[in-house]
Structure formats: C-alpha cells, structure tokens
C-alpha cells in the first residue's frame, strides 16, 4: 500500500499541540476550504455526541465536496488508537466508509523542548483496479493538503507568518 509522510517542527509546547489535534475543532481548522468539509456528527467511544477529546473508538461522520464539484462524498472515520506518554503521543484514524479502499492516518507528536515535531503518515489505496495502479500518484494530491495542514498548524499555534522549517 502506498504511503505519504510529512514532518514539521512547531514552535509551540507539546501539550498545546497535542491538545489542539485531539479535538474536532483541530480537524476543522486544518482542513482547506476547497474541500468544503462538513462535520455531520462526532460520537465518543461511549456513544455520547460531541466528545471533548477524540479518544480511541470515537467516530467522525463528515462529508466533502472538493472544489464544489459533484455530489458530496460521505466519509466515516474511526479513531482506532490513541496513546501518549513520556514526550510523545499519537493517534490513528481509519476511514471505515468513504471513497478510498483503504486510508490509515497516523498523527504523531514529539516533545522537543519548547517545540514540537508533528508527523503525519498516511497509508492509502484508491478504489478499483485502475485506482490501485494509480495509488502512488495520490501523493500528488496529498502533498498540497498536508503542506497546508502543517503551515496552518504553525500559524494557529505559533502566530502568522511562521516559515516552514524542515525537521
């Protein structure tokens, strides 16, 4: 299965970065407007609506309509793993309903003094035999999406105008 990985450094404390990414508001803030994201429902592991934290077994039902073209695409994502401790944290979401045949997104965070290293890794496959053959080309679409997400993370947690810095 093809994978895409992006890593960046954020000049913000680990606890603040982890907390920001642990809430549905973080997803909404980091999703580009051209996706026309709509969060339809969020349920926690106990079935309660709108949990404060996206814990393991939380389910996110959303829809997108990229560039306003075509019908809305419905997606359901499940938080399958969440752990933190000793200067690192991560959570994994898997698409359980949606266009890709497979989508597993691992969000990792590493404490580095006054800064935090953020890493996204996506393992994915596209639908149909033709899509599977073209899956490596999915990186072309993932690059701009994750550049935006990492730039926006820095803007929101560091302040405007923060340059992208390689890790």
Image (tube, helix red, strand yellow):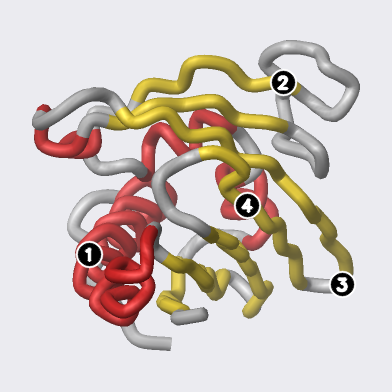
- The answer to whether marks 3 and 2 mark residues whose Cβ atoms lie closer than 8 Å is no
Expressed as whole percent of the image width and height from the top left, the position of residue 105 reads 56, 61
Residue under circle 1? 141
List x then y, in percent, for residue 68. 11, 28
The relative height of residue 60 versus residue 100 in the rendered view (above or below) is: above
Q: Gap between marks 3 and 2, in whole Å?
A: 28 Å
> Which callout, 1 or 3, points at the residue further toward the start of the chain?
3
Residue 14 figure quarter: bottom right
Name the secondary structure under disc 1: helix
The secondary element bearing badge 3 is classed as: loop
Quick one: SS at disc 2?
strand
Q: Earlier in the sequence, mark 3 or mark 4?
A: 3
Marks 3 and 4: CB-CB under 8 Å?
Answer: no
| Callout 1 crowding tier (Cα within 10 Å): few <14, some 14–19, many ≥20 | few
Which of the two labelled residues, at mark 1 and mark 4, occupies the earlier sequence position?
Answer: 4
Residue 85 image offset from top left, x and y in percent? 87, 65
Q: CA distance from mark 4 to mark 2?
A: 15 Å
- Graded by Cα atoms within 10 Å as few (under 14), some (14 to 19) or many (20 or more), the crowding at tag 2 reads some
The numbered dot on residue 162 is none
Q: Which mark is residue 86?
A: 3
Q: Earlier in the sequence, mark 1 or mark 2?
A: 2
> In the shown orientation, is residue 118 left or right of residue 81?
left
Q: Which mark is residue 94?
A: 4
Q: Which quarter of the figure is the C terminus placed in?
A: bottom left
- As drawn, the residue found furthest toward the bottom would be 167
The CA span between labels 1 and 2 is: 29 Å
For image coordinates 57% across by 70% down, the residue present is 116
Q: Label 3 to label 4, Cα distance in Å?
A: 25 Å
Q: In the rendered structure, which disc, 4 or 2, sits on the residue that comes first in sequence?
A: 2
Q: Is residue 129 above or below residue 49?
A: below
Assess disc 4: are there few (<14), some (14-19) or many (≥20) residues with their C-alpha within 10 Å of its C-alpha. Answer: many
Residue 43 is labelled as 2
């Amino acid at each position: 299965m093809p994978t895409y990985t992006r890593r960046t450094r954020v000049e913000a404390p680990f606890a603040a970065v982890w907390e920001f990414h642990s809430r549905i508001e973080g997803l909404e803030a980091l999703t580009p407007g051209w996706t026309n994201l709509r969060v339809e429902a969020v349920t926690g592991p106990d079935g309660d609506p709108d949990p404060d934290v996206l814990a393991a077994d939380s389910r996110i039902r959303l829809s997108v309509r990229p560039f306003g073209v075509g019908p809305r695409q419905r997606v359901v994502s499940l938080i399958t793993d969440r752990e933190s401790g000793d200067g690192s944290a991560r959570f994994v979401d898997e698409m359980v309903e949606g266009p890709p045949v497979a989508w597993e997104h691992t969000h990792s965070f590493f404490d580095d003094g006054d800064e935090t290293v953020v890493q996204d890794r996506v393992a994915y496959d596209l639908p149909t035999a033709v899509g599977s053959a073209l899956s490596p080309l999915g990186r072309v679409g993932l690059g701009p999406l994750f550049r935006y997400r990492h730039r926006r993370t820095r803007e929101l947690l560091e302040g405007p105008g923060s340059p992208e810095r390689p890790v």
